[in-house]
Image (cartoon, helix red, strand yellow):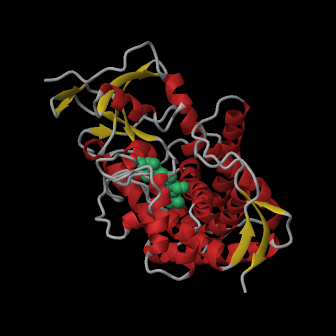
Amino acid sequence: MTRIPKHGGLDHSLSLLSDPYRYITKTCDRLETDVFHTRLLLQKVICMRGKEAAKLFYDTSRFSREGVSPSHIAKTLFGQGGVQGLDDEAHLHRKAMFMSIVRHERVDKLAATFRDVFQQRLVQWTKMNSVLLYRQVQEIITIAVCRWAGVPLPDGDVDRRTTQLASLFDYAANIGPKHWYARIARKQTNAWLGELIEQVRRADYQPPKNSAAEIIALHRELDGNQLSTHVAAVELNNVIRPTIAVSAFIVQSAHALHQHPEYRQRIADGEDGLLQCFAQEVRRFYPFFPFAGAKTRESFVCNGYRFPAGQKVLLDLYGTDHDPRIWELPDKFDPDRFKNWQRCPFSLIPQGGGDYATNHRCPGEPIAIELMKVALDLLVNYCQYEVPEQELAIDMRRMPAIPASGFTIMKLNLAN
Ligand code: HEM
């Protein structure tokens, strides 16, 4: 048996915070390994990267999720009691609820709603001096996803709700005032969505058939009971919040279009499958979540390494998406690499890996891809705009990582 290499030293939380997307890969490279022990927040943690590591990480007989999320993340990003912390039968059953919310035809409906709202906004943007894309797209998605999910949102509430919901993912990794803002926003949005769940259950409000609000409010757990109001609100938020987070992928897409203008013409020419390839490459290339966490159930040996029982393990998502053994020239933005891509559940993992229904892989992947494709189409084929001088470097310490400017565009005109 070989000992798992160790990143020696007291604690490496600061190294991780200062370079969250590259800490694991850099340390792996330095120690010439794909797996190493470290200490983060004074806790022993095993970090690993690559396709084989992903395959191991998504083996549910070896890893569990209960109690894995750090409390500052559970109290902002995820909420407490949601699907992310479930295992085994409870997870499968709750996950099936999510899979019924994101059925193919429902995703198409969301994409069509998003397109409508976005097109109306494009008209408004022609009258604005400058458009802060990140914020504007967040508002567009908030309106579209609430309409689709059966969550009433009066026009006067769009600004406030967008700010609250976006803070849940934008400030999740922050400490200090932003973290406290996100904790308050978590309480406010849970209270809002919890009230809606109660209204549906009392039949005071009837959401559209098969909407997320209806499915979650009426969902029954394995014991035959409905979800508590709190957990139902967390799960409805688990649909709405990450859909708004697709705004980061859309800003990254606009950034990629700006950096690689040759794709504008190819997209405008309607090249077959290019929107899909472009969206996939944005998800692979740009940083979003650095890693996912789990803990070992029992001790086991894999590839000669002993993993102790109850051991916290982080899987490097960004590093695996940039692993040169999987991706040729990984630091090159190259949508064409997806033209003949052999789909593999453990190589492209910006939203987790494995199987949607049985693992913790993100059920929102098709939503993210479809919304990105709509946004790309509208930004290329329905308008022209200029990108003024601004800080366009991707801020690698920000999560999700977008240009520090939030990406401003100007002089927008509708295409003829
Ligand atoms: C899980 C990323 C969009 C709902 C996850 C995971 C990641 C992720 C990394 C965890 C995988 C793991 O723990 O192994 C993203 C990114 C998105 C996105 C980067 C783009 C903005 C969405 C959307 C939805 C969604 C649009 C809407 C349905 C969820 C849920 C889980 C999840 C419910 C928990 C699944 C489970 O525990 O079984 N996502 N996601 N996500 N995502 Fe997403």
Number of marks in the image?
0
Residue found 28% across the figure and 65% down from its top: 342
Specify the quadrant that holds the C terminus: bottom right
* Depth order, front residue of 405/60: 405
Give the answer, above or below, for where 162 lies relative to 218. Answer: above
* Depth order, front residue of 229/391: 391
Residue found 29% across the figure and 59% down from its top: 344
Residue 310 visible (yes or no): no
Specify the quadrant that holds the N terminus: top left
* Depth order, front residue of 108/298: 108
Farthest bottom residue in view: 416
Farthest top residue in view: 10
Q: Give x and y (percent) for residue 306.
A: 20, 26
Q: Is residue 31 left or right of residue 153?
A: left
Q: Give x and y (percent) for residue 106.
A: 50, 74
Residue found 85% across the figure and 67% down from its top: 128
Q: Give x and y (percent) for residue 218.
A: 51, 64
Q: Give x and y (percent) for residue 249.
A: 56, 57
Query: Which of the 4 quarters of the picture holds residue 305?
Result: top left
Give the answer, above or below, for where 23 lies relative to 85. Answer: above
Give the answer, above or below, for where 286 lies relative to 276. Answer: above
Q: Is residue 165 left or right of residue 213?
A: right
Residue found 47% across the figure and 41% down from its top: 290
Residue 194 visible (yes or no): yes
